[in-house]
């Protein structure tokens, strides 16, 4: 950008801002994802930095809000454990402080209850199968959702005892 006129620079900034705003119109996104988008669109890194800084200071880019929203929806809609949610947020480039804040809204008791609910559902769906197959499939489901082996085993046993 060393030889750009102020007007050319402003045009590049506006083009980059439009790219980001169109993406944010669809849904919230972390800053890292927006930076990747601008890089894929071959926006000059200095222009990208300027645009992202401006939008962040205006409150349009907020990694903490993004992390909190994602944590709530993944937990409520999919029953994902805090560990799985944290991994997803890390993959998306969200910082540890925002992740910790987002996960603080999920209580341990709520997480255990969600694991039991998932186990109940899986056990109902696998009623016709052999007990060892039901156990294996239920524990595998809970593992994929991010629950530790001990929480998964406890949830399985509790759900099984309630049948």
Image (cartoon, rainbow, N blue to C red):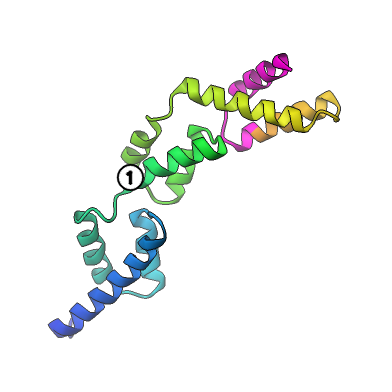
Please report the bounds of the magenta region as a residue range: 142-163
Percent coordinates x, y for residue 100 in the rendering = 36, 34
Percent coordinates x, y for residue 135 in the rendering = 75, 26
Point 35% across, 62% down: residue: 35
Residue furthest to the left in view is 6
Point 24% across, 60% down: residue: 55
Percent coordinates x, y for residue 130 in the rendering = 86, 27
Side of 131 where 115 appears, left or right: left
Q: Which residue is mark 1?
A: 65
Q: Quadrant of residue 23?
A: bottom left
Q: Nearer the viewer, residue 106 or 99?
A: 106
Secondary element under disc 1, as helix, strand or loop, is helix
Q: Quadrant of residue 147?
A: top right
Residue 43 vs 8, above or below: the answer is above
Side of 74 where 2 appears, left or right: left
Q: Nearer the viewer, residue 99 or 62?
A: 62
Q: Residues within 10 Å of mark 1 (few under 14, many from 20)?
A: some
């Amino acid at each position: 950008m060393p030889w750009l006129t102020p007007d050319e620079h402003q045009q590049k900034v506006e083009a980059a801002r439009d790219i980001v705003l169109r993406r944010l119109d669809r849904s919230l996104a972390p800053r890292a994802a927006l930076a990747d988008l601008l890089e894929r669109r071959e926006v000059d890194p200095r222009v990208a930095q300027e645009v992202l800084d401006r939008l962040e200071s205006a409150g349009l880019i907020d990694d903490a809000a993004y992390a909190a929203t994602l944590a709530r929806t993944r937990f409520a809609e999919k029953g994902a454990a805090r560990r799985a949610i944290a991994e997803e947020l890390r993959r998306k480039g969200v910082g540890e402080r925002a992740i910790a804040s987002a996960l603080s809204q999920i209580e341990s008791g709520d997480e255990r209850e969600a694991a039991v609910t998932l186990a109940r559902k899986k056990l109902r769906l696998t009623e016709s199968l052999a007990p060892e197959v039901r156990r294996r499939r239920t524990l595998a489901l809970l593992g994929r959702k991010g629950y530790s082996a001990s929480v998964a085993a406890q949830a399985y046993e509790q759900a099984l005892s309630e049948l």
